[in-house]
Image (spheres, rainbow, N blue to C red):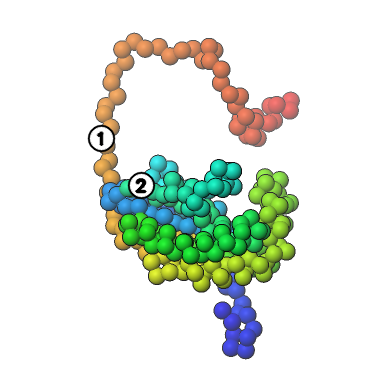
Amino acid sequence: MAHKDGRPAPRPARLPREIYERELYRLQAELVKVQEWARAERTRIVVIFEGRDAAGKGSTIKRVTQYLNPRVVRIAALPAPTERERTQWYFQRYIGHLPAAGEIVLFDRSWYNRAGVERVMGFCTPQEYQRFLHQCPIFERLLVEDGILVRKYWFSVSDEEQERRFKSRRDDPVRRWKLSGMDVEAISRWEDYSRAKDEMLVHTDIPEAPWYDVDSDDKRRARINMIAHLLSTLPYHEVQPAAPDLPPRPPSHGYVRTPKQMQTFVPDHAATLLPAQRGRAQR
């Protein structure tokens, strides 16, 4: 958004944590209903997460799946193709990850790699790229015609915020692995990726499977907005799963537990964190 004089509008303040956590939990409860509805109705759902590096795709996927059954809701995050896969039809290796009846698949990056990183970094030929732009809408229309619900989200982040997140990853030893050489290269190719995204949207933003843009400079807002929108596009209803009756515990028939001395337990590291235990250890 921008003012009438062309100046960029100020970004909204970061969503307060208390409001964010309360609404996130409510939305996650709705996602559980979607899961049970999909399983009961044998619905197939594909959700595609694409966007800039460090735009918050992975953290949003974590919040989506936090309370869901991994046997119903799967994450597809494919590695680089093998030599054999490079000789296949481009969409072929993705087809095996599509959902069966009653399943939901979240693609953490997808076939749109060809329109993004492969295009910008020269990992595909111009002919392969043009073929992708031609075939992708056809491929997605086939999925929709077959009854699969396809939702596509593009996570946008400003160049300043992306650089800040890259630096945060670099300086955090437990997240440094998330900063790859490809991410570093993305900084100098910012406009190339922008042009690639624009061209991709021209060809693949189709009525049957439109793109939805998620402003992700504030990760909390991005997660809330994306999940709320996804829920609004699904015709789900609450399906109450049967609560099984717990049988009474049967009486003992003489079983005696193995003595603890005969078992190898992991050390109680947690006890060393308690102040009283630390005091005893120091004496």
Look at the numbered disc 1 and give the secondary structure of its residue. Answer: loop
Considering depth in this image, is 64 or 107 the residue closer to the camera? 107
Residue 2 in view (yes/no): yes
Residue 29 in view (yes/no): no
Considering depth in this image, is 208 or 72 the residue closer to the camera? 208
Considering depth in this image, is 232 or 263 the residue closer to the camera? 232
- Horizontal and vertical percent position of residue 82: 58, 43
- Horizontal and vertical percent position of residue 154: 52, 64
Question: For the point 56% across and 57% down, which residue is it?
Answer: 113
- Horizontal and vertical percent position of residue 245: 25, 35
- Horizontal and vertical percent position of residue 18: 52, 60
Look at the numbered disc 2 and give the secondary structure of its residue. Answer: loop
In this rendering, would 192 be left or right of 149? right
From this view, report whether residue 282 is shown above or below residue 223.
above
Residue 100 bears which disc, if any? 2
Question: For the point 58% across and 88% down, which residue is it?
Answer: 4
Q: Residues within 10 Å of mark 1 (few under 14, many from 20)?
A: few
Disc with the residue nearer the chain's start (2 vs 1):
2
In this rendering, would 155 be left or right of 138? right
From this view, report whether residue 140 is shown above or below residue 249.
below
Question: For the point 37% across and 12% down, which residue is it?
Answer: 255
Residue 14 bears which disc, if any? none
In this rendering, would 17 be left or right of 22? right
Real-space Cα separation, disc 2 to disc 1, in angstroms: 30 Å
Q: Residues within 10 Å of mark 2 (few under 14, many from 20)?
A: some
Q: Amino acid at mark 2?
A: Ala
Residue 245 bears which disc, if any? 1
Foreground: disc 2 or disc 1: 2
